[in-house]
Image (cartoon, rainbow, N blue to C red):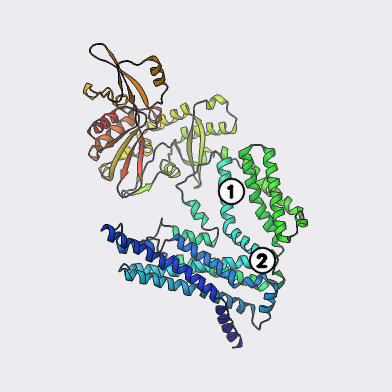
């Protein structure tokens, strides 16, 4: 009973001492939540009064401002978690204060609990009050619907769990360190170390694994980032909108499983912090680290990424093994000396523990030069043909969309997804092309095998054991065209490579806009000579141009060309014709005719005749950001006839 009373008294005393923290958070949350909402609604109302119409209705504007999915709100809450933990447990950085608290007739667990509860409540009270004020603002403007109010309450629960995760992670950092500086550095390390290492790995892959394929449409990277820290987890949970139910306030509605995950993270981290607090010595207050055995581990963990980044910079500047090694050792040594100074606060001790530097240098060099010289053989990867189930190859011109049986989109413009969609079982020619590319990559093939004219081909290897690998290899352009010509002879592969070949009325009914772009063309070059009545010489007409002017005209940019016209009397007339990019808006009514002509051209042209172009024809779809893009040039004679008709009618 005495212990319980002592705990409650201490908790109330702690709450009284942290009134300043409660007041600071009250002001901050009022500004971030209700005041911001009030300003947004007032501006919308003023817009309504002045112009008679507003961009959004009151209910829509209110829903856009409050509730779920606001990363900026989550960021403020996470910062509050860090602040509350630092304020509540700041005494562990002082041996004198620790002696006082630990002399009380109270177990460490109860002391920890009283601090924990009082500091958490200093957040919960102002946060919930600010959320209630947000609801009152919505009621005042008659914009708060029941669904929006429920989502505000759900966002409040989620916000408290975000706070607890941030708070608990900060406590772990505090229990491992002994002063304010190293605590802040520890928080930064817990939050940023794994993302930094992941970015370094990606950079190494981009620089040294030159055959890797970077898929910027792939969300795997962001999913991986959420596992790096509780802060990243909370921000990801707030910002994600790719799955689940999107609420009335624009954010993703968290399920019971999502909330339970946050509870588990906060609980586990709190138990870890409590366990560290129990074994933490009073003498640790004021030291850099509370547990000395961690010192070499932390030093090596910091030194390795610093050395790797330094080696990468040297590679990009000089591309010399000697300079790369020098940078790795030099900056690794500097980082070790800085950390040693933070540990000892004594300049004379910065060169102590040289064996720690040696271990870090060996690890950094092993990682760097393993990538540098491709020890893993990533750039020359080629599985055995008998181990493959399917292969894909593409030069990736344009974006294409496939459809499932219900007519839904099953892949978009992602390069990896495109390779997934054109897997081919009869892959002998593709495999032979990949094998030749690997020999070139290894340097075993003669220079003439690649030639001056080469292209990049993207491959996918789908193994029978389920493993998938993607590579980008340089191949001889003529050889690549030869392989593609052979593959495109099969109508099934042609339909996979160019999905437009399978379009039916249902798919075409989804197309809302069609545009064709031709860069650096004029009408006559693209569609043939126009009628006499269509000749327009108003741009600049001269009866005579001297040679100097003609020479100067020939040196002008490619957009302009001198055109000569001979009239009935035999006199020559000159004018400078501007060659502009041509944009053709094809009416949807002409879509069936256009598709039929385009498919006919695809079947009659060689792959070289198809791919030698920068021009494209785009098909846009209603209620989606996806669009399909196909190559087009002067070789598409049937398609040009349809486009010519659309051009002169637009």
Q: Position of residue 395 (x, y in %)?
A: 44, 35
How packed mark 2 is, by other alpha carbons closer than 10 Å (few <14, some 14-19, many 20 or more), is many
Whether residue 507 is visible? no
Q: Quadrant of residue 34?
A: bottom left
Nearer the observer: mark 2 or 1; the answer is: 2
At mark 2, the secondary structure is loop
Q: Measuring 35% from the left and 39% from the top, which residue is drawn there?
A: 499
Q: Measuring 68% from the left and 79% from the top, which residue is drawn there?
A: 100
Q: Quadrant of residue 516?
A: top left
Q: Which residue is mark 2?
A: 179
The mark that comes first in sequence, 2 or 1, is 2
Along the viewing direction, whichever of 109 and 593 lies nearer the viewer: 109
Q: Position of residue 355 (x, y in %)?
A: 76, 53
Q: Measuring 52% from the left and 69% from the top, which residue is drawn there?
A: 164
The reply, left or right, for residue 353 in relation to residue 533 is right
Q: Position of residue 143 (x, y in %)?
A: 31, 67
Q: Which residue is mark 1?
A: 200
At mark 1, the secondary structure is helix
The reply, left or right, for residue 615 in relation to residue 123 is left
């Amino acid at each position: 009973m005495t212990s319980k009373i002592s705990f409650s008294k201490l908790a109330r005393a702690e709450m009284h001492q942290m009134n300043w923290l409660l007041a600071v958070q009250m002001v901050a949350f009022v500004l971030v939540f209700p005041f911001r909402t009030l300003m947004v609604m007032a501006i919308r109302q003023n817009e309504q009064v002045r112009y008679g119409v507003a961009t959004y209705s009151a209910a829509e504007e209110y829903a856009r401002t409050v509730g779920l999915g606001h990363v900026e709100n989550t960021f403020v809450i996470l910062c509050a978690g860090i602040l509350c933990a630092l304020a509540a447990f700041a005494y562990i950085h002082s041996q004198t204060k620790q002696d006082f608290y630990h002399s009380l007739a109270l177990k460490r667990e109860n002391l920890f609990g009283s601090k924990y509860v009082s500091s958490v409540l200093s957040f919960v009270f102002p946060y919930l009050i600010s959320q209630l004020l947000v609801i009152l603002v919505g009621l005042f403007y008659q914009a708060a619907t029941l669904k929006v109010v429920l989502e505000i309450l759900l966002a409040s629960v989620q916000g408290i769990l975000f706070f607890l995760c941030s708070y608990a992670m900060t406590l772990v950092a505090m229990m491992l360190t002994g002063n304010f500086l190293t605590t802040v550095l520890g928080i930064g390390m817990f939050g940023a170390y794994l993302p930094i290492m992941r970015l370094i790995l990606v950079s190494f892959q981009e620089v040294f694994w030159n055959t890797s394929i970077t898929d910027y449409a792939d969300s795997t990277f962001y999913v991986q980032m959420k596992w790096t820290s509780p802060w990243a987890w909370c921000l990801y949970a707030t910002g994600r909108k790719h799955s689940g139910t999107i609420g009335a306030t624009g954010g993703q509605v968290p399920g019971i499983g999502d909330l339970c995950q946050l509870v588990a993270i906060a609980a586990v981290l709190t138990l870890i912090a409590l366990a560290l607090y129990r074994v933490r010595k009073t003498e640790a207050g004021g030291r850099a680290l509370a547990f000395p055995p961690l010192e070499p581990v932390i030093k090596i963990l910091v030194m390795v990424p610093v050395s790797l980044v330094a080696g990468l910079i040297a590679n990009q500047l000089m591309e010399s093994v000697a300079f790369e090694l020098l940078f790795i050792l030099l900056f690794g040594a500097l980082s070790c000396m800085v950390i040693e100074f933070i540990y000892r606060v004594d300049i004379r001790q910065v060169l102590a523990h040289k064996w720690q530097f040696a271990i870090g240098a060996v690890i950094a060099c092993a990682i760097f030069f393993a990538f540098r010289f491709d020890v893993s053989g990533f750039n020359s990867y080629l599985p055995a043909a008998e181990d493959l189930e399917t292969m894909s190859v593409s030069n990736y011109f344009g974006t294409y969309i496939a459809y499932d049986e219900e007519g839904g989109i099953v892949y978009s413009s992602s390069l990896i997804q495109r390779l997934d969609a054109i897997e081919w079982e009869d892959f002998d020619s593709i495999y032979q092309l990949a094998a030749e590319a690997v020999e070139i990559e290894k340097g075993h093939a003669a220079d003439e095998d690649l030639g001056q004219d080469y292209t990049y081909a993207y491959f996918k290897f789908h193994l029978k054991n389920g493993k998938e690998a993607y590579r980008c290899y340089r191949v001889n352009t003529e050889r690549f065209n030869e392989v593609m010509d052979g593959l495109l002879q099969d109508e099934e592969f042609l339909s996979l490579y160019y999905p437009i070949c399978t379009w039916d009325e249902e798919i075409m009914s989804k197309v809302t806009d069609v545009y064709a772009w031709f860069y650096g063309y004029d009408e006559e070059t693209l569609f043939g000579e126009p009628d006499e009545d269509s000749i327009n010489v108003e741009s600049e007409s001269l009866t005579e141009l001297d040679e100097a002017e003609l020479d100067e005209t020939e040196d002008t940019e490619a957009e302009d060309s001198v055109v000569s016209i001979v009239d009935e009397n035999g006199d020559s007339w000159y004018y400078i014709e501007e060659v502009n990019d041509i944009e053709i808006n094809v009416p949807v009514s002409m879509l069936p005719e256009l598709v039929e002509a385009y498919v006919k051209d695809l079947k009659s042209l060689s792959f070289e005749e198809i791919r030698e172009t920068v021009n494209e024809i785009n098909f846009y779809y209603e209620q989606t950001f996806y669009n399909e893009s196909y190559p087009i040039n002067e070789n598409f004679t049937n398609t040009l006839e349809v486009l010519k008709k659309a051009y002169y009618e637009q």
